[in-house]
Image (cartoon, rainbow, N blue to C red):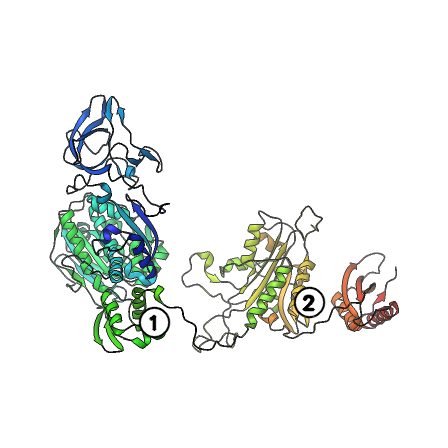
Amino acid sequence: MKVPVSWLQDFVDITLPISELAEKLTFSGLEVEDLEYIGIASPFQEGIKGTSLAWDRDKIFVAQLVETLPHPNADRLKIVRVEYGRGEPVQMVTGAPNIQIGDAGQKVVLALEGSRLYDGHKEGREIMTLKKSKIRGVESSSMVCSEKELGISEEHEGIIILPADAPVGTPLADYLGDVVLDIKINPNFARAQSVLGVARQIAALTGQAVRLPQHWNTQEVGAPKTDFVSIEIADPKLCPRFSALLIRNVEIKSSPYWMQVRLLRAGMRPINNVVDITNYVMLGYGKPLHAFDYDALVARANGNAPTIHVRPAREGETMQTLDGQMRAFSAHDILVTDAQGPVGIGGIMGGSETEVSDNTKNVLLESAIFDFISIRRTTQEQKLPSEAATRFGRGIPSSQNVAPARLAADLMRQLANGSVHPALADNYPLPQMVPTIHVTTHEVKRILGIELAPTEIERILQSLDFEINEASADALRVTPPDYRTDVDGADDVLEEIISIHGYDKIPSTLIADALPPLKGNDALEQEEAARDVLVDAGLQEIVTLSFTYPAHEASLRPTSNSETGSPQDFPLPARPYVEIANPISPERSVLRQTLLPNMLDIAASNLRYANRAAFFEIGNVFLTRRAGENDSRELPEDQAFSLPLEPRRLAIILTGPRARATWQPADTTPMDFFDLKGIVEDMLAGLHVRDADFTPIAHPMLFPGRAAALCIGDSTVGVFGELHPLVRANWALPEHAVLVGEFDLDAILARTDARFIVKPISRYPVIVQDIAVLVDEQVEAARVQALIVQTGGALLNSVKLFDVYRGAPLPSGKKSLAYTLTFQALDHVLSDVEAGKLREKIVRRLEREVGAELRSG
């Protein structure tokens, strides 16, 4: 929020240097993100982001037009003489379209020769130095300035016409110079989302008094029915208060220059006096208002006094808003309606049929309070963020409803020549409650860590307009001001105390109690161990959104009639989805049941620019809970069944060459099923998971014959293999093997061995021998390897399958499996005789168990 210091000074005296004030505000919770110096020099040598050019105090002045004469050699140019209170009037040439021949008396901005200004005829902000010159034969050494030349705005169509009371001869830096504070308003500082709100914080920090407008009355209450309008509220929870004032015979015109300048510096564009007044009051006092064309409302009521009815929208009800859009509403939206239908979205935007136009004569000024949760929801759904919606979305006290509206009505009287009807239409069905809060010095010390005397606590709270109802040696009973509905408990009061006392004054202290014993987080440590193994295997971790939509996950099935519900359909459960109540888009309407679809999106995107992808993700999926199902979370009894299951999953995607091509030799053959299987084996070995086995399966998302399930004991904990070509086509992936796998990480980590045997490294040489055996086609290589390991015992260091062969001259139905056996002893040099005996023992075991034949040559 942009807050001009000149506007702040209407409410509170600024007694500190601006930089020091900004620091105090920041340490109190109002973070000043930037300072913009307008027309005055920044105290910082390098300036501040967004700072305008400083106006020379001895060259740029408030001046007055003495006369305007025609240029002898140019129809579009004029000669003006300007007086600035110092010597003879100055003559110059101008082409400004907003002064005419014969004009005199207007207050303008005069820049003398040597002034540094922005060049109004060039794009952007290019600095020039004003020099004496001849313009079509007439000498001119000075200039009457536009807003662009001074850096106020980009307006260059005419020169600045100052208010009639502008003091001639005053340096412009003193008259229009300003500093704008750019303040970050966090949600807990919603009461400071106005110039008055910031001024109240400054007053409390600096010991000043806040100046409120004359006749500021937050206690005024009117009647729901007046002779010009009646107000009805269907649900007080959605609209606790709705007030209206009538201003007749307004004259729609431009706002005065001082108001336009304030609005521009606060970040809003001036429109006309009525609209500008509502924006001015919102920015200055924090209360959004809306102006209706009263005659349009009367016409819709067939010439009678209108009845305003605030109610929830009917499902599908429509209205054209001020931005020209036809909008449809849901039952949770709040509408302001009359006899003909909607005339505004409560707290967000009015309807086009009743908007104020250049022909408006009578204005009905609305000031209302709406439910902040409903405002937030409607703003998001309708995509209508605004300054008003932001303020309503953070809550506005009902007590602050009428006083700002009275101020706006009085401004319309002064600036639009309107006549304010004395009656206040006001429906107030849900009066604001103001709590009384008990605060003790013990709580201050315990929670804030500082000791404050009751008198100091009382002083701080009184500076924040808290009322002290009762005080004792160690306690206070206080009532917050009526504009502070965010304070409803002792913790809120303590937050106010420390914000004024100063967060920077909290002393650094050591903890007095003994530190609790440190306990490891086994689940997290095991998960990190899995990450380490996968990264060491050359995979890159990615993180995808938990949101998706059902059709996206259905794309994992090549056909719509693929069977579901069997164990082999993991990770595609036949369960209803967990739906998002208020999704940001249809593509983010449910929570995911599998990690793979969103990962395939990332892979497809990356493969447009690269030929290789090796990704993994660890994350939760969300499954609707069935009766009797539990998970590891400790939940309250009332939530145990309603919340979804959130098991951890691990998913892997591989495609492309095994290694990237470089100047060194690299294996660039495409990855296949066994690359993925090897990574899974490495992970299981790194996590010390025993009793794991791989079983061939048929799976709807995987290529037939190139799919397997990972089993631990009797449980299937994952599936992996080559993606089915039809599924691959759903993501427009390249036409080569895409390997995918998804695993139940919770089930895998539950079977890790916390304690495992570590073998010492032998200092004796190894003996390496190869063995090739002929077995039936149905015999699994894993079973053969398991028998070799069991038989080899402690002297068998490792076993590696290096070849599988089928075909001539082997008999039909047979295959050859070739293994490399590495023998090594820990306590002596192993002899060839010992290794040979072990090899023969292994061959006999294979002959006996699986009918293997030793191949020769």
Seen from the viewer's position, the closer of residues 795 and 344 is 795
Figure check: 569 above or below 181: below
Please tell me which residue is depicted at 22% across the width and 67% down the height of the picture.
462
Mark 1 or mark 2: which comes first in sequence? 1
Spatial CA distance of label 1 from label 2 is: 66 Å
Figure check: 674 above or below 517: above
Secondary structure of the residue carrying tag 1 is loop
Q: Is residue 93 left or right of residue 610?
A: left
Q: Is residue 17 left or right of residue 250?
A: right
Q: Which residue is mark 2?
A: 695
Please tell me which residue is depicted at 34% across the width and 58% down the height of the picture.
26
Figure check: 119 above or below 663: above
Mark 2 closeness class: few <14, some 14–19, many ≥20 residues within 10 Å = few
Q: Which residue is mark 1?
A: 450
Seen from the viewer's position, the closer of residues 710 and 225 is 710
Q: Is residue 634 visible?
A: yes
Q: Position of residue 439 (x, y in %)?
A: 28, 75
Q: Is residue 342 visible?
A: no
- The C terminus, quarter of image: bottom right
Seen from the viewer's position, the closer of residues 681 and 108 is 108
Q: Is residue 775 left or right of residue 683?
A: right
Marks 1, 2: nearer the viewer: 1
Secondary structure of the residue carrying tag 2 is strand
Determine which quarter of the picture holds residue 572: bottom right
Residue type highlighted by circle 2: Thr
Q: Position of residue 818 (x, y in %)?
A: 80, 62
Q: Position of residue 809 (x, y in %)?
A: 85, 57
Please tell me which residue is depicted at 15% across the width and 56% down the height of the picture.
305
Q: Position of residue 656 (x, y in %)?
A: 65, 51
Q: Is residue 84 left or right of residue 350?
A: left
